[in-house]
Image (cartoon, rainbow, N blue to C red):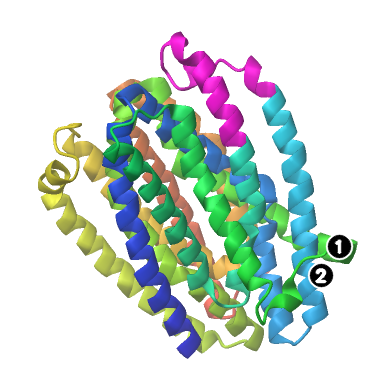
Amino acid sequence: MKNLTINIAGSFLIKMLSLLLNLALIPLGMQLLNEAMFSVWVILFSLLTWFTFLDLGMGNSLRNLLLEAIHKGRKEEARALVSTSYVSIVLFTAIATVLLLVLVPFIPWHRIFSVDVIYLPLLKKTMFIAIALFAAQVVLKNISFIFHGIQLSFLGNLVVFASNLLTFIWLLIIQQNHANVSLDYFTGISLGSPILMYILASAILFSSRFRFLSPRLSLFNRQLFKQLNTTGYKFFVIQFCTLIFIQGNSLIIAQLHGSSDVVDYNASFRIFNTAVLAFTLILAPVWSSYTKAFAKNDLAWIKKIHRRLLSLWALAAIGLCVFLIVSPWFFERWIGRLISIPIIIHVANAVYSMVHILASIFTSMVNSCSKITIEFTSFILGSILFIPTVIAMDGMFHQPSTIIFVNAAFLLCINVVLAIQCRKIMTGNARGIWNR
């Protein structure tokens, strides 16, 4: 319990500082890029986030298996797990990156980003840079799952904070010198900073008392690869489907409405999503603690933590409602008159954030014990139905907020199913598909 408290407190402090930097980066980005290029960056970042699936879900499998191996004192197995995950992710990421880079020249990027064709050469150059840098991030980010596995999740948040700080300082220097910045240069700074921090974090971890986890190519183990993928492929699909719900909005809004609506949505989403991110940092160490408790069959402790999390969700929902009331005043002082956001966008993002936080409570429990078949099936069905439903509803109401409300409705339906499963797990009554 003490370790959990330290992780939550440390994560909360670091994440709040990181969120403040993220908020400062939005008006800074708007000043350095024109509206069209800033909207491209917003959509591009959403697209790149989809590529996190290149780890095939092995990161989440690694954190569970690594925690179990270390808890039972099996250091050699722990190192082999880390080595196998790195080798596998490098291989899959390299193959996917080559394929994507080959396709870049043949894709009409100006249509995807809904901008004039004159930007096409710049967009192609930017995509080459973005894909290469983000692929490196996918591999190096594996260190974050190791931090979770050794129950030092706050260190992962520290790396993110350091990355945001480096990006902010770099861009602020450019702004203070009144220099112009192109989209490709802006992308290089934003995606290159995390790479430097992940390399530094990896060097420090693997030269510390955790050097026994340092990966080696010769320690790749086919049997452990199968273990990582037993639930890994399900985590992979869930991760991909989740990105459709979370990151798909920007791309859908761009295609159905326009780039200015993307900027409005993103600015509002960033603020209201702060509550989701704050809650996520609380859940990060809880996931590992749940895994440990399930290993001990300590269902009473799991019930107690689950009840506390639901109480925190109620407080978060009240906080979001209060902030919704003062949001026009806040946005005027945050980004001034750079953009004017309709209040219905704020309402939609507030509702979505409430539903998303609730979903994270349920998924943290089922993910920690790897009983994810229900979650896996629910997200697949939801993803299949989501886009046609969005297109149909948007055709009726012609409002960007409709897309967000539909997103929240789908996620709420999934929450109902997962709530039933969590109750069955906590009472020891999970049978059949509910227990897989």
Circle 1 SS class: loop
Whether residue 61 sits left or right of residue 191 in the image: it is right
Residue 33 against residue 217 in the figure, above or below: above
Looking at marks 1 and 2 on the same chain, the residue that comes earlier in the sequence is marked by 2
Amino acid on which disc 1 is placed: Phe
The verdict on residue 105 being magenta is yes
Amino acid on which disc 2 is placed: Ala
- Name the image quarter holding the C terminus: bottom right
Q: CA distance from mark 1 to mark 2?
A: 6 Å
Seen at 66% across and 83% down, the residue is: 295
What residue would you read off at disc 2? 80
Residues drawn in magenta:
103-131
What residue would you read off at disc 1? 220
Mark 1 and mark 2 in contact? Answer it, CB < 8 Å. Answer: yes
Residue 280: where, in percent of width, then height?
43, 63
Seen at 67% across and 45% down, the residue is: 54
Q: Indicate the quadrant where residue 335 lies.
A: top left
Residue 58: where, in percent of width, then height?
70, 58
- Label 2 crowd bin: few (<14), some (14–19), many (20+), radius 10 Å: many
Res. 16 mark: none
Residue 401 in sight here? no
Give 391 or 119, whichever is nearer the viewer: 119
